[in-house]
Image: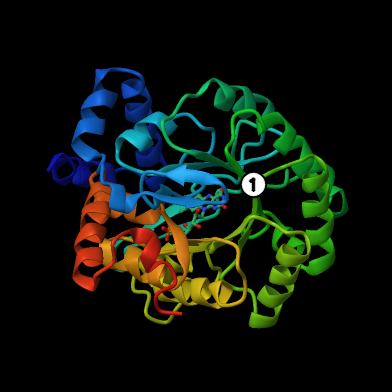
């Protein structure tokens, strides 16, 4: 109800300004009675939603995708909105300003966003200690990216530095080699680079360790990446990041902006990639891309996702979204005769 009033005001602002304003509001409430009030309103407490993946326990399967809370400023408030985990970051070894603005665009007719943020973040030296001081009631993932100034062949040490700075505060770690907005980054998804980066992180005892893939990889390239996941006994796969493709169906004029597309137009493709990955690996899959309601979350779960995440739909649907999805999931589990969400994981495979 509150968001119905706030949304038109927020949508009058440039997208990034609206995002910053929202985060400022969340930050002001964090650690206060507002956080408790939101928790009472939005957290769905039901044993059927509890699930575990890569050795961690989750109250529910719906998390916040990387990029929303890049600097780990509001994980407590996001948990209070009912999310079962929060993936902070991307964090890079060097603090960096990201690309020039504007760099975040709404595509309202398509319920989508295009972003070319370019890993703007405060850097691992700042985010790491902040995370270590955070006592959010849900698991916190750390999405790690490569600093723009670091050459590709020095990427392993760059990722390791960010891991070591954030190790104390993170519960799981995601190697992000799939953002389209750092030149050359997605080349790191090839076998040799991946082995070097993941090997370096495992040498530093980074666990649980996951890798996040692009929806634009060919089937063969995904299979190569999964071979590395198997060889190195990684703990999970996050599928997927944003796409540089532009489906013909897009109507908003901002489709012409350069960057990664997210939201409704990538939903089906993302679910199909979740299925592709889940069919080829035994490790947990985190399903991301276009989730905006319980049916969409459930589709990814049935396609093999142990957890789901979302970002773009928060912009369009507002703060009640995690609660609505979790409540809706309970109804869908009931309808289909599942005792718990865990039983539905991979039901369609
Ligand atoms: C503004 C913005 C920033 C993002 N930043 C990151 C990031 O730093 N690291 C990352 O792995 N993914 C990032 N993503 C991708 C999301 O985590 C997610 O994979 C993608 O948006 C698809 O999910 P959605 O359709 O629910 O938004 C970002 C997405 C958006 C919209």
In the rendered image, residue 244, in percent from the top left (x then y), is placed at 56, 69
Q: Where on the picture, by quarter, is residue 296?
A: bottom left
In the rendered image, residue 294, in percent from the top left (x then y), is placed at 27, 62
Counting other residues with Cα less than 10 Å from the Cα at mark 1, is it few (<14), some (14-19), or many (20 or more)? some
77 relative to 273 in the view: left or right: left
27 relative to 43 in the view: left or right: right
In this view, which residue lies farthest toward the right? 153
Q: Is residue 53 above or below residue 281?
A: above
In the rendered image, residue 64, in percent from the top left (x then y), is placed at 42, 47
Q: Is residue 80 above or below residue 339?
A: above
Secondary structure state at the residue bearing disc 1: loop
Residue 288 visible, this orientation: no
Q: Which residue is mark 1?
A: 208
Which residue shows up at 68% across the image and 44% down it?
A: 207
161 relative to 251 in the view: left or right: right
Looking at the rendered structure, the number of numbered marks drawn on it comes to 1
Quadrant of image for the N terminus: top left
Which residue shows up at 21% across the image and 27% down it?
A: 37
174 relative to 15 in the view: left or right: right
> Ligand 1 closer than 8 Å to the CB at disc 1?
no
Which residue shows up at 78% across the image and 65% down it?
A: 231
In the rendered image, residue 297, in percent from the top left (x then y), is placed at 34, 63
Colour convention: rainbow
In this view, which residue lies farthest toward the front? 339
Residue 40 visible, this orientation: yes
Query: Toward the viewer: 140 or 78?
Result: 140
Query: Toward the viewer: 175 or 187?
Result: 175
């Amino acid at each position: 109800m509150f968001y119905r009033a706030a949304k038109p005001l927020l949508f009058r602002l440039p997208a990034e300004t609206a995002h910053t304003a929202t985060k400022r509001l969340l930050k002001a409430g964090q650690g206060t009675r507002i956080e408790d009030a939101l928790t009472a309103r939005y957290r769905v407490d039901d044993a059927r939603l509890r699930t575990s993946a890569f050795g961690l326990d989750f109250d529910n399967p719906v998390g916040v995708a990387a990029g929303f809370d890049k600097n780990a400023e509001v994980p407590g408030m996001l948990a209070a909105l009912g999310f079962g985990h929060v993936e902070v970051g991307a964090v890079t070894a060097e603090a960096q300003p990201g690309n020039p603005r504007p760099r975040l665009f709404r595509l309202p007719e398509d319920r989508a966003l295009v972003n070319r943020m370019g890993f703007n973040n405060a850097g691992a030296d700042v985010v790491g200690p902040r995370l270590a001081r955070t006592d959010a009631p849900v698991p916190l993932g750390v999405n790690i990216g490569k600093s723009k100034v670091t050459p590709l062949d020095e990427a392993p040490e760059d990722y390791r530095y960010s891991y070591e700075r954030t190790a104390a505060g993170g519960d799981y770690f995601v190697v992000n080699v799939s953002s389209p907005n750092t030149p050359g980054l997605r080349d790191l998804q090839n076998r040799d680079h991946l082995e070097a980066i993941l090997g370096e992180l495992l040498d530093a005892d980074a666990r649980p360790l996951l890798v996040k893939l692009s929806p634009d990889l060919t089937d063969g390239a995904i299979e190569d990446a999964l071979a590395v996941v198997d060889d190195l006994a990684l703990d999970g796969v996050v599928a997927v990041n944003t796409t540089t493709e532009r489906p013909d169906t897009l109507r908003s004029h901002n489709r012409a902006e350069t960057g990664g597309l997210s939201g409704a137009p990538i939903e089906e493709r993302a679910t199909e990639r979740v299925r592709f990955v889940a069919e080829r690996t035994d490790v947990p899959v985190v399903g991301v891309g276009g989730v905006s309601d319980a049916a969409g979350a459930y589709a990814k779960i049935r396609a093999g996702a142990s957890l789901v995440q979302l970002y773009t739909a928060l912009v369009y649907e507002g703060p009640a979204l995690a609660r609505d999805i979790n409540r809706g999931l309970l109804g869908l589990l009931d309808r289909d005769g599942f005792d718990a969400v865990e039983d539905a994981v991979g039901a369609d495979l």
